[in-house]
Amino acid sequence: MSTDTQDWFGWNGEKLAEPHAKKSDANRGLHIRSGGLKNHAVFLKQPLEGAFDLSISLEPFDGTATHGVILAENRSGMPDPSNWVAIERLPSDGHVAVRIHGVRDGQPIEIQPPRLALIEDGSSEDTLRDSIARGILFPPDDPPRLRVMRNTLGGVFHFLFSDHRLIDGEMARGWSELPTLSDRDGAAYFFGVYASDLSPNQYAVFSSPTSSPMPATDNHPSDQYFGANRRGYTWAGYHGDAVVVSFDERADWPDAKFVFWSEANYIPWWHINDHVSLTYEFVEIWGGGTVGCNEPMSDHLLRWTRAKIIESNPARVVVQWDYTLITSNYQWWNSHPSIRPTVRETFTFYPDGVGVRKVTYRPPLEDKDTHHKWGHELGEIIVSFGGGKFSHDFLTTPSLSVFDLKDERHDYSWDTSKPTGNTWTHQTEGWPAVIIQSNFKKGLASPFIAFAQDERVHEFTSPTVPIQFGSDWELNAWPGPEEFTDDAGRLDLGGFSHWPVMKQPYDSRSWIGSTVLREPRHLSLISVLSGPGGYEWPVGPKKRTFAMLIGLNNDPQSGEANARKLTRSWIYPGRVSNVTTDFEFASFDYYERAIRFRATGESSRLQFTLTPEADIHHPVIIVEDWKLATQEVKVTINGTSLSKSKYAAAIENGRLILWLDTSIRQATSIQIE
């Protein structure tokens, strides 16, 4: 977007006017003055069509003038004074405020409250931090920015203003949002800036304009290969930074993507398609002097939540996600100056599209504490939808299935036309594994997650067995408002609109309930708790580690059998024997879904026998201190060389990582060299 005055024209609300604009010698942006008019706007000559994301910086005033950004509909090549909307910064009762206002068809637009978002003037104790604007201060050396997004998929306008605050010794910067407005299909808009109540010789300065992409779909050349990439990512017409794990034809769902996205606070999810996603959520706690949920959903400024690629090679991908458990106003348990509840989640994926979610939770314990009697959540099954979308267009019936490794199964469905009566009454304490599958319609993948409770493995995977499920609130239908009715007269489920994408201040301590269909929203289907309270923390490092198997199925019916066989393979990896000299068997690693060996001599040929307890699908072998630096290895199974297309190998930090595209159903000799 240019600040060259030749690209702009003046407008006084009724007719063309002198631009009264200049570009300063210091090239600090576009300067406009009133030219004797009370209100004066300067518009880009070229109207905007389709989706867009525009922002611009404002020169701070002495608090007496108003300036902002305006969008006016194109009427016969000129801005329409009967159809416009603006976001502006203005003085208000000794504060600086941001608001949106406008007219549609000549009538004032009705804005959802809060109509006016006050910005605190420097006091960290200001109650405005909690209630409306989440505490933003615009210092003179940091000009505020205003931003307007038009999402044509949801038919919605977003109005945002720059937000930054000092949090725990570090400045966090991002955006806060005012209420959204509906868009009019097909309309084109003139983009302008304006100022009012300027003194005759006073200029308003608008600088550093940006225009960001708003593609409708997510397509990237790397998506056809297995690996992890940091790149721009699009979902539901919104764009942002992301770590994207993609897969190829070796996965059950080759088009799958597992994504850590800035506009979802880097909370990872399965990209089901460009309009729907599913996340297993995160660790969540409550209490400790705070009110509301302590979770990474609250970290809209991305102060602590971040994702990074640890490994991305032909054999596997490892992505690490770190976050702190905070409330929406950035408080944490007991507000201790140095002890915060933190979580590190490590996701390890192999070419078959199956991964392990390893969760390491460090609770807010002081040194004198020996145990932690507050329960915590391990996750929720949450489905997110883009604006304008209905849940029944994607979820099938039953929408959720919970089953074990044999034939126990419980299904859940949601129907807004009548009370569902869903309650969690089914005990899973005796199950060796609890598998939860979300059921999507034909043509869409159905994600699953498996919790291992078998007594032989639970110290690694579920130290607080049995896994428990939350209250029944998720299991009952939450009908949305009347606007959530489709063309067939079906009223859809409601949900929550504080995440993803949305950055409005909460209207409660924990959430914003969905009231308009145009905004992205999420539904919580079921929550998973860590088990009974009073868990004795180990002496030494005070942390708790869990592991879950995750993946996608082609469809709900066949997917149940697939999830069961993969979970058995993970929990019961078999028995290792006949290991050659110069190597030793180390362990079955449930966090990496691997059989681990260690080289003890100079040989570069490992041979062993693997005897399954249950069928082992796509075994993974890791050898520490591997002696060969070359990435090329040769694999032989029962004396027959395995084709290179049937395995993937990589050397990472002196370790051989080997994934085999085969199944082991009987005692099998495996040789690697």
Image: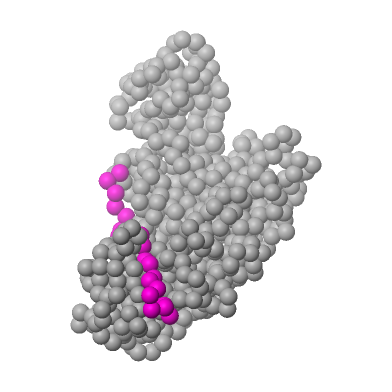
Q: Is residue 94 magenta?
A: no
Image position of 190 (left or right of 483): left
The relative height of residue 222 versus residue 382 in the rendered view (above or below) is above
Q: State the residue at coordinates (34%, 68%).
A: 31
Q: Position of residue 20 (x, y in %)?
A: 29, 75
Q: Position of residue 621 (x, y in %)?
A: 46, 27
The relative height of residue 227 versus residue 336 in the rendered view (above or below) is above
Residue farthest front in this picture? 201
Q: State the residue at coordinates (52%, 50%).
A: 305
Which one is nearer the viewer's eye here, 609 or 506? 506
The relative height of residue 413 versus residue 197 in the rendered view (above or below) is above
Query: Which quadrant does the N terminus fall into?
Result: bottom left
Q: Tell me where the magenta segment starts and ends, as one range.
A: 197-222
Q: Is residue 203 magenta?
A: yes
Which one is nearer the viewer's eye here, 499 or 551? 499
Query: Which quadrant does the C terminus fall into?
Result: top left
Q: Position of residue 164 (x, y in %)?
A: 52, 59
Image position of 414 (left or right of 129): left
- What is the tally of numbered marks visible in this picture? 0
Q: State the residue at coordinates (35%, 20%).
A: 630
Q: Is residue 559 visible?
A: no
